[in-house]
Image: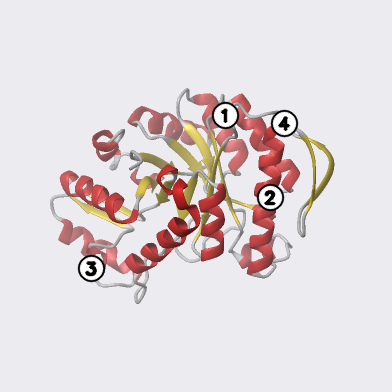
């Protein structure tokens, strides 16, 4: 099975804070620093902080301040970026970072954010069709050959894909989503499949992840073992008193503490427990690429040290 890799998804209100997060992430041994792609003040709705940094300038700066840390988007909404510009910017960042970009793409989901930016929020089939065509455009661009694309949603002509990314045969592509069609596209076209899930009363997240991984496995066929499966726990705490921690965390999600104890988006307990839990989740779900919110970058570092490369 693929070895563990660890990432941070972050943001910062200043250059100093962003540089500090990037360099700490690299020093701790995290593989990647991701940036989300939101612009509306309440990007994720209730409980989500506003986002300060636009993703592409932020990851360029992070790459310049580090030497090994990979950088990427988790995930870029295809409707927020002109497709041909997105492909060229991604290729440029990968070239200048010497192959360290992970381009995360998604079909878009936050209707209020679309409305705030006066963008049309198309129906799901149309958005997913566009995602598929943007992926085709990016891969054609990254080949460096002239091409024409005449899709339903994306059209270019007299187009030459320059620059060519440093990573070959193409730069790393992560595709995120929760539904069958998107996850099937991710399984066939991506290098990393990012699973989208929530902590909510009445939602059986274990069953949701099992179903999602089933979609990926069915679509990927023989290439399933080559894929990284990415998931972001929302709560992380190394403690010898998990009961107290779960009591404190449960009101944030409107659930009972016991609901969180074995939840796949929660990592609370001793260092040994977290290590064992992640190994179990990799064995059961195939999740080997673990992204944590920036708030836990220090607390989670001992886990990174224990599991990186295993």
| First in residue order: circle 4 vs circle 3 | 4
Give the residue number, with chain letter if any, for mark 2.
Answer: 134
Q: Is residue 251 left or right of residue 214?
A: left
Percent position of residue 143, x then y: 68, 33
Q: Position of residue 198 (x, y in %)?
A: 41, 64
Q: Is the residue under label 3 in contact with that under label 4 (CB below 8 Å)?
A: no
- Quadrant showing the N terminus: top left
**What is the distance, in whole Å, between disc 4 and disc 2 at their CAs?**
16 Å
Query: Please, which residue is most extreme toward the front here?
Result: 222
Q: Which residue is mark 1?
A: 167
In terms of secondary structure, where does tag 4 sit?
Answer: loop
Residue nearest the viewer, comparing 116 with 143: 143
Tag 1 secondary structure: loop
Q: CA distance from mark 2 to mark 3?
A: 42 Å
Q: Nearer the viewer, mark 4 or mark 3?
A: 4
Q: Nearer the viewer, mark 1 or mark 3?
A: 1
Q: Which residue is mark 4?
A: 144
Task: Give the mark, 1 or 2, whose residue is nearer the N terminus.
Answer: 2
Real-space Cα separation, disc 1 to disc 2, in angstroms: 19 Å
Q: CA distance from mark 4 to mark 3?
A: 53 Å
Q: Which mark is residue 257?
A: 3
């Amino acid at each position: 099975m693929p070895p563990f890799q660890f990432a941070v998804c972050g943001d910062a209100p200043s250059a100093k804070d962003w540089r500090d997060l990037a360099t700490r992430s690299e020093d701790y041994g995290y593989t990647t620093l991701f940036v989300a792609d939101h612009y509306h003040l309440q990007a994720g709705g209730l409980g989500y902080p506003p986002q300060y940094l636009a993703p592409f300038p932020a990851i360029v700066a992070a790459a310049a301040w580090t030497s090994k840390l990979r950088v990427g988007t988790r995930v870029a909404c295809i409707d927020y970026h002109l497709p041909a510009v997105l492909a060229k910017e991604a290729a440029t960042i990968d070239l200048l970072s010497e192959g360290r970009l992970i381009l995360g793409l998604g079909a878009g989901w936050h209707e209020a954010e679309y409305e705030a930016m006066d963008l049309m929020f198309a129906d799901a089939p149309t958005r997913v069709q566009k995602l598929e065509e943007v992926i085709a455009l990016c891969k054609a661009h990254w080949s460096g050959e002239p091409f024409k694309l005449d899709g339903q949603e994306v059209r270019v002509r007299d187009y030459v894909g320059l620059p060519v990314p440093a990573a070959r045969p193409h730069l790393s592509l992560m595709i995120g989503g929760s539904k069958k069609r998107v996850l099937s596209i991710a399984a066939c076209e991506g290098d990393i499949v990012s699973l989208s899930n929530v902590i909510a009363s009445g939602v059986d997240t274990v069953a949701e992840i099992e179903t999602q991984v089933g979609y990926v496995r069915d679509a990927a066929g023989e290439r399933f073992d080559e894929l990284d499966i990415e998931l972001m726990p929302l709560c992380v705490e190394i403690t010898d008193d998990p009961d107290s921690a779960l009591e404190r965390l449960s009101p944030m999600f409107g659930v009972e503490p016991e609901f969180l104890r074995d939840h796949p988006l929660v990592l609370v307990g001793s260092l040994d427990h977290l290590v064992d839990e992640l190994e179990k989740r990799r064995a059961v779900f195939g999740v080997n690429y673990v992204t944590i919110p920036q708030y836990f970058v220090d607390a989670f570092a001992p886990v990174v040290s224990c599991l990186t490369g295993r």
